[in-house]
Image: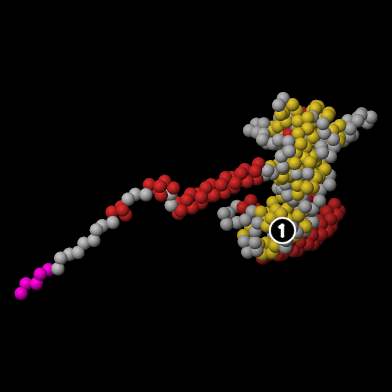
Amino acid sequence: MNRKEAPIETKPSDLSRLKIDWKQQRTGSPSRRSRRGLWIALLLMVAVAMIIGLRAFSNRAKTVEVATVSSLAPSQSVPFLNSSGYVVAQRRAAVASKGTGRLVELRVREGDQVKKGEIIGRLESADVEAALARAKANLNVARSANDQAKAEMDDAASNYDRKKSLREEGLVPQADFDVAQARFRRAQAAIASAQAGVRAAEAAVRAAEVDVENTFIRAPFDGTVLTKNAEVGEVVAPFGSSVQAKAAVVTIADMSSLQVEADVSESNIEKIHLNQRADIALDAYPETKYEGVVQTIVPTADRTKATVLTKIRFLNRDDRVLPEMSAKVAFLSEPQSDQGAKPKITVQPGAIVTRKDRKVAFRVKEDRVEMVPVEAGDPIGSQVEVKRGLTPGDRVVVNPPEDLAAGDRVRIEGNVNR
């Protein structure tokens, strides 16, 4: 039986839900308004941070070097020429052996003080000592032969004298006298030969003694051991005659002969003279100044560098000065003879610069600088005279940067010494 399908019941659709609310679209949703406010706040924070950063950058302290304005009396010497060089021992020796052999003893090490003639080391000497003993034995043999020759000479001489007197009286024949005379002459020749043999044996003994002495390595002068070049057990030889043999055993230097060797350009050598005073500063101890005097001006130039070598002797050297240290030398001018002249105010030339066609200096006050107009005078050594604007004791910036201005904060990196 067919069942009738129930009719589908439909409700009228609410078409009003499909209408667009243009007013809500124009005003925006609350979530969009909150996002827009967040972006505005972020932009404001970034702007504030940039402003703070720019202010901090503008107020950042500039790193500078400063020099102190000084007062120079007429009687003072001032440096007018600087040079660099090295400390060199004028008396230095690489000590080697005069003989060849294995090193069996080494009595020194680096830094030890040695005296002239002191034994530094010793080579094996069994062979040369045996040769010395043989030479001494040969000398004894030669002396014995000489004694025998003397005895024969005495006998031959007495026999010759006796035969001679008898021959004069006619008591002996001529033949006997001739025999006695020939024997006497042979005895003379034998004793001359024996004496020569003794001298030769004595010379052989002296040569053997020299060979034994050559096994001892002695200091040639008073000094300090700088380096040790060989060890016990190694073979040493004069002049390193073999690849495996060591030449120098130790290197010693006379520390009292230390001088600074500095090159001076040819254009400035006329300003240097013997006995001229100089200040010496070692790179190892920059805070210490040593007094020196020009000891030698080497009478030749180096064509490759266009310089002349000068040697400056220490006047107040201490034990800290070592060979081969690098040094800086400031040659000093002669003091002025005018004792009645007024002291002059001087400063490093790099402290005076030109700003807007004016000579100025940047004077440091606490952590800021002020720009001071100055009037510069003539150079005095490595300094320049200041006639107006600065006073002794002022600290001024050396080689100030172009962007340094009055009122800027500075941080002092170091002091430029005179």
Q: Nearer the viewer, residue 262 or 96?
A: 262
Q: Residue furthest top?
A: 357
Residue 161: % across, % down: 84, 55
3 magenta-colored: yes
Examine the rendered structure and indicate whether residue 341 appears above or below residue 122.
above
Location of residue 400 (image quadrant)? top right
Q: Residue furthest right?
A: 340
Residue name at image x 79 percent, y 53 percent: 319
* Residue stretch rendered in magenta on the structure: 1-5
**Within 10 Å of the Cα at label 1, are there few (<14), some (14-19), or many (20+) other Cα atoms?**
few
Q: Amino acid at mark 1?
A: Glu
**Quadrant housing the N terminus:** bottom left
Residue name at image x 65 percent, y 45 percent: 56
137 magenta-colored: no
Residue 134: % across, % down: 69, 64
Location of residue 188 (image quadrant)? bottom right
Q: Residue furthest bottom?
A: 1
Q: Which residue is mark 1?
A: 110
Q: Nearer the viewer, residue 243 or 384?
A: 384
